[in-house]
Amino acid sequence: MSLKGKIKKSLRTKPHMALAVARTLSFLQGVRGRFALFGRYRNSFIASDVRMIGISNIQIGKNVAIGRGSWLNVNDRSSQTVALSIGNNSFIGVQNCFNVGRSIVIRDYCLTAMNCAFIGSAHRYEDPMMAYSLTGTTLDGEIYVGANCFFGYGAQVIGNVRIGHGCVIGAGAFVRKDVPPFSLVVGNPAKVIKRFDFSAKKWVAWPTDHLAEGPSEEEYIEHLRQEHGFVIHAISAAAGHFGDVY
């Protein structure tokens, strides 16, 4: 057994020492992360109580706001590759959760309300005779959210899911399957009830036999850039500077 293994085995019989070591590691990781935070994300607003685990694997674009109480967690931190990416001009609401398996990509101009969750990883449970806190996590989930998607209160995206650009995900929706671009999705399990018809220029009931598809994602992003540039976020909805009364 390695020296590291022997130390861990010894600590398991000494709860006070185990807790002291855990606290020390947490403090050192926090100091390291805070220095990295100031250096990496100068062009974005991140509320002071946002938790970011795996900061070296998190990429945040320009003019992004991340609301208070949110949790950004990268489970596989063995390399320096980007596992969580949030695009330019996106607004992440209060108490959002990003639990990364292989990757989570949020493209430009996305908007999430309070309590939204993007879950690409879960604790392993093959052996119930082991403590689940020690079994490790799954690392195969890939979540992709196209540009300018809006997620209502409490919406959840779980597993391997690709959501096309221009979508609206209703409050409380539970998304486990791919969603085509410019779709309106509601329910648990979530289903597409409308799509935007670019010929009629309105949302129409889905399914339908006649639908004029919209622009590609890159064309859509370029349109948004030309139309809106860098948006002015409602930072007070993410975190108050002088309290929570406005």
Image (cartoon, rainbow, N blue to C red):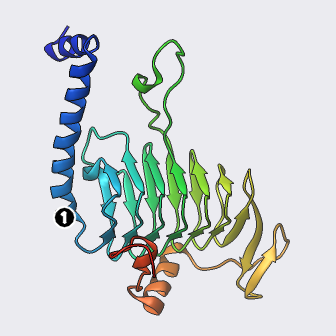
Q: How many marks?
A: 1
Left or right: residue 184 compared with residue 237 = right
For disc 1, the neighbor class at 10 Å (few under 14, some 14 to 19, many from 20) is few
Label 1 residue SS: helix
The residue at which mark 1 appears reads as 38
Instruction: Tell me what residue is drawn at x 43 percent, y 49 percent.
Output: 103
Q: Height in image: 1 above or below 103? A: above
- Residue 52, image x, y percentages: 32, 52
Residue 99 vs residue 208, the one in the foreground: 99
Residue type at the position of mark 1: Phe
Residue lying farthest to the bottom in this orientation: 227
Residue lying farthest to the right in this orientation: 209
- Residue 34, image x, y percentages: 19, 56
Residue 73 vs residue 27, the one in the foreground: 27
- Residue 122, image x, y percentages: 50, 36
- Residue 207, image x, y percentages: 83, 66
Residue lying farthest to the top in this orientation: 1
Q: Quadrant of residue 78?
A: top left
Q: Height in image: 135 above or below 200? A: above
Instruction: Tell me what residue is drawn at x 59 percent, y 53 percent.
Output: 157
Q: Height in image: 8 above or below 68? A: above
Image quadrant holding the C terminus, namely bottom left
Q: Quadrant of residue 90?
A: bottom left
Image quadrant holding the N terminus, namely top left
